[in-house]
Structures are given as structure tokens and as C-alpha cells.
Amino acid sequence: MKGIRVTTPGGAEALQYAEFDRPAPAAGEALVRIEAIGVNYIDVYHRTGLYPLPNPFTPGSEAAGVVEEVGSGVTQVKVGDRVCYSHIGAYAEYSVVSAGKLVPVPDGIDSRTAAAALLQGVTAQYLTKTTYPLKGGEKVLIHAAAGGVGGILVQMAKRLGAYVFGTASTTKLELVRQAGADVVIDYTKEDFEAIVTEKTGGAGLEVVFDSVGQTTFDKSLNCVKPRGMLVMFGQSSGPVQPFDVLRLAKKSAYLTRPSLAHFIADREELLWRASELFEAIEAGAVTIRIDRELPLSSAGEAHTLLEGRNTVGKLILIP
């Protein structure tokens, strides 16, 4: 089979399209014939070595396809089932996955949508339902609100009745409006902290969802109200620098850095989160925007587009 290998972490050129043996499922595993692969920023972190993996490795953390073969003892899925999953090794024509990590794809959702939605959509679900359970009338700031997770976060927050501030660059502001944000902020020209302060009368926000990191952290923390929460779930601008934890005492603020893996480790919890996501998509409450599809052999191009912020929606690789 063909797929992508990384032998030495580095730039987009580290993604080498190669031929290697098709894996066979062991006990408790299933072989999935991949139909669509979602490209995520964590794939970049793996490729560069920021989040190191043992070399060589096949990157990719999200895909959808059809179960081709199952190992002994597998009861969760059967041959022919349409599934999606979040698991390392997705940049390939076939992948072996623990059967407990496979999520059934509803008939009304195609493989491209499933591959585009699962990781980012379940992230938005756990952030708004568990990390900070949003309630109607609460005020929230969502950074990178035109991005993959950000755009879904806006839609889910509005579905829960929240008042949403969203930041984006000039060319992506309309996407944030379309997602339903109440206040749209051009971070290239406007001071989001000043706008939040003005719009809330200085009261601040219940929660800020920040995937940007270094360049937004200080002002994001300033935006939360007393006993409010800052949720850091990414660092696209770089890691947050060390800081004095006593800064939190000024407002008795909460700071958390959740990771998806801890919210889907249990199969029952994974299926609950995914089912809520897919129900929202099928109901039209959440729209998954796909920027473009590229062949798997163009994974390097996909990473270049993603890192250059030259996408509007999800990038999909097709084996």
C-alpha cells in the first residue's frame, strides 16, 4: 500500500510518499480501508517533532473509511461497517486501529464530512459540554473563530444560547458572522481586550477558548471575569511563556489546558460525544466547511497551506 512516512522530523518536505506493507489486524484490532483523511494542526506538531513520535512513523490523526478485516475478539465493528476514528497513522491507504476507537458513521454523513468533523467537532463538544459547560446567556470569547475547531465552537456555543465574541483575520470575518458570532473582531486591526471590556461594561467573560497561545494569552486572561475560566487548547502562535501563578489570584481565575485524548479514552464517552456531533450536523445546527481535497501524495502541500493560514475550512486528503 502507499502512504506517508516521516523518518526525520522537519518541514513539509519530511512527508515522504512511499510504498510499504499493508498491516494486518491483531486481536482487538480492525483494518480500515481509508476513504478520506482529515488534516489537523497536531499533524504539523508531530511532523516537526514538537509533539515527538518514534521514528519512522506515519502521521495523521483522523480518517474515515470502511472496515476491511477484523482481528480475533472484535465485537464493536464488523467487515463492511463505515467508521471514522482519531488515531495516529491516518496518512495511508489502510490503517490498523483498535476496534474500541472506531466510531460508526451515520448513513446521512459521507466519509469526507466524517473525516473533516470528528477530531475538531469532538474537541468543540468536550470544550463546551465538559471543560466549561456553557449555559444560555453566558459570554464567551473564541479565538481563531474561522478555523476548524473555532468555527464549530461558535456554532455549538450559539446552539447552547451563549453570547459569542469571535476573532479572525480581515479576510475571514464573514465566515465568523456566518457561524453566528454576536461580535466579530478583526485581530489584525482591533484590540480584542478593549472590545470585550467595552461590550461587557468591564465585567468580563465567563470563559475564553484560546487555541492561539503565546500572542493572545495575556489579554485572554485579562478578559475573564472574577472566577472565570481561560481554556488554552492550542498554541498556533507558539507556547505560552512561564508566568507567575499568583496572577490568577487577581480574579480567582481558572486556567486549564485540556487534551482531547483524556476526553475520549472511554469508548462510551467517545460514542456519546461523536453522536452529539453527528446529530448536530444532520440537524443542520453545525456546518462542516471543507476548504479543498488533495491527493494523499500532496500531504506536504496540505501542511504548507495549513501553516500559512491559507485555508478556509478543513483540508482533506484522498488516498
Image (spheres, rainbow, N blue to C red):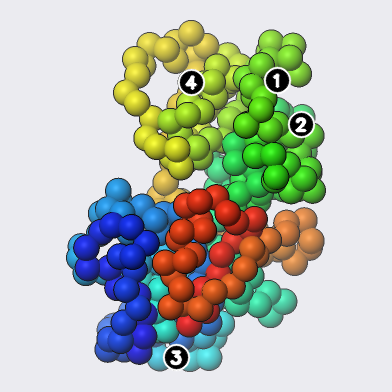
The answer to whether mark 1 and mark 2 are in CB contact below 8 A is yes
Disc 3/disc 4 C-alpha distance (Å): 49 Å
In the rendered image, which residue does mark 1 sit on?
Answer: 195
Residue type at mark 3 is Glu
In the rendered image, which residue does mark 3 sit on?
Answer: 68
The answer to whether mark 3 and mark 4 are in CB contact below 8 A is no
Secondary structure of the residue carrying numbered label 4: helix
**Where residue 303 appears, x then y in whole percent?**
45, 60
Residue type at mark 2 is Val
Mark found first going from the N terminus, 1 or 3: 3
Secondary structure of the residue carrying numbered label 3: strand
Disc 4/disc 2 C-alpha distance (Å): 20 Å
Decide: few, some or many residues near mark 3? Use Cα within 10 Å; few <14, some 14-19, many ≥20.
some
In the rendered image, which residue does mark 2 sit on?
Answer: 183
Residue sitting at x 62%, y 32%? 188
Disc 1/disc 4 C-alpha distance (Å): 15 Å
Disc 2/disc 3 C-alpha distance (Å): 47 Å
Residue sitting at x 48%, y 82%? 319
Residue sitting at x 58%, y 54%? 310
Residue type at mark 4 is Asp
Label disc, if present, on residue 141 of the rendered structure: none
The answer to whether mark 2 and mark 3 are in CB contact below 8 A is no
Identify the image quadrant of the N terminus. bottom left
Question: Quick check: 193 above or below 288?
Answer: above
In the rendered image, which residue does mark 4 sit on?
Answer: 218
Mark found first going from the N terminus, 4 or 2: 2
The answer to whether mark 1 and mark 4 are in CB contact below 8 A is no
Disc 1/disc 3 C-alpha distance (Å): 53 Å
Depth-wise, is mark 2 or mark 3 nearer the camera? Answer: 2
